[in-house]
Image (tube, helix red, strand yellow):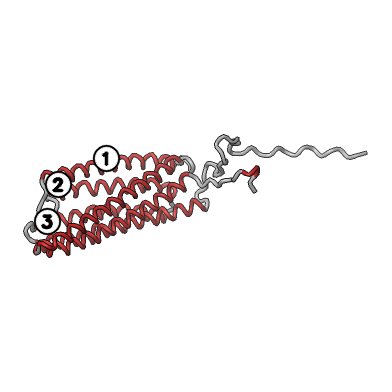
């Protein structure tokens, strides 16, 4: 029972709290990637009728606008959740020992590199679309070649950031799952632009080849990326469950006072005083 009417709170730890937010961010990104793949496949199937009849351009354009808005919203929500979750995990980097603290220092470097690459990729895409809009609304060939270089590098550093965020807390099975997810993410980021670039560059005037390239990019690129995100989410979910069960045990205490100004005894707590000698027998 709480004393003096003050509620007692169970402190779950910054690492556990941040890991849960990262799981939600990965699940939202998974839904976004699947939605992007389905949209890309739908646009590929609608491309032929849209170019053959003027009335088919409007549904295709509306579908593209709705898809871009939905994907952008999902990306923003995912980014906010992930950054907040990573902030919690990084703030609690000393809760599980020196290995976790060092691993998160490296994860922060990888995350910063990924953010820089994301900004560079966005600026490159906007600049290329402005200077060379491409064929029939599709990206230009040099834009595809640029994404073919930037996308795998960005996926590499994003996967390393996730890997080193949880590496010190993961068991052997979870580490293998994290590495597998990292490799699949790189493969998906490579396969999508590669297949699309081959299809567009091989037959710029062949609509069937472009449609086939879009479908292959949606199936291979987005499919591998979705599988990678699913494995990452499962690994982080298992790690969070282990942390809640005390595996590994936290180095710092998990009890938080109700108010920050309350007295906090030193940790580890001092042992109780030894019992004194028994009283002398009564005469």
Query: Viewed as shown, does residue 1 lie left or right of 189?
Result: right
Q: Earlier in the sequence, mark 2 or mark 3?
A: 2
Verify CB contact (< 8 Å) between mark 1 and mark 2: no
For image coordinates 26% across by 52% down, the residue present is 69
Q: Nearer the viewer, mark 1 or mark 2?
A: 2
Q: Which label belongs to residue 22?
A: none
Q: Which mark is residue 129?
A: 2
Q: CA distance from mark 2 to mark 3?
A: 16 Å
Q: Residues within 10 Å of mark 2 (few under 14, many from 20)?
A: some
Return the residue at label 1. 116
Q: CA distance from mark 1 to mark 3?
A: 28 Å
**The residue tagged with tag 3: helix, strand or loop?**
helix
Where residue 121 sits: x, y (%)? 22, 44
Where residue 169 sits in the image (x, y, percent)?
Answer: 44, 48
Using the image, tell me which numbered label, if any, was put on residue 200. Answer: 3
Q: Pointer 1 and pointer 3: residues touching (CB < 8 Å)?
A: no
Q: Residue at x 9, y 64 (%)?
A: 53
């Amino acid at each position: 029972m709480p004393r003096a009417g003050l509620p007692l709170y169970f402190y779950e730890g910054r690492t556990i709290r941040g890991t849960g937010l990262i799981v939600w961010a990965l699940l939202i990104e998974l839904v976004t990637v699947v939605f992007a793949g389905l949209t890309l496949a739908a646009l590929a199937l609608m491309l032929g009728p849209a170019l053959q009849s003027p009335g088919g351009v409007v549904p295709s354009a509306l579908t593209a606008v709705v898809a871009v808005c939905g994907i952008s919203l999902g990306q923003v929500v995912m980014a906010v959740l992930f950054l907040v979750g990573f902030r919690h995990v990084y703030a609690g980097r000393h809760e599980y020992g020196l290995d976790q603290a060092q691993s998160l220092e490296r994860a922060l470097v990888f995350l910063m590199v990924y953010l820089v690459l994301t900004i560079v990729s966005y600026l490159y895409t906007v600049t290329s679309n402005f200077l060379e809009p491409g064929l029939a609304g599709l990206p230009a060939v040099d834009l595809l070649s640029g994404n073919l270089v930037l996308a795998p590098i960005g996926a590499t550093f994003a996967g390393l950031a996730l890997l080193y965020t949880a590496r010190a807390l993961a068991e052997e099975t979870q580490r293998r799952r994290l590495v597998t997810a990292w490799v699949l993410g790189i493969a998906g980021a490579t396969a999508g632009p590669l297949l699309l670039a081959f299809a567009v560059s091989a037959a710029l005037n062949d609509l069937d080849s472009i449609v086939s390239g879009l479908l292959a990019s949606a199936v291979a690129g987005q499919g591998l990326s979705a599988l990678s995100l699913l494995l990452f989410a499962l690994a982080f979910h298992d790690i969070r469950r282990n942390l809640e069960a005390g595996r590994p045990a936290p180095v710092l205490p998990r009890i938080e006072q109700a108010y920050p100004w309350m007295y906090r005894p030193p940790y580890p707590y001092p042992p109780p005083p030894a019992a004194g000698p028994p009283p002398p027998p009564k005469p």
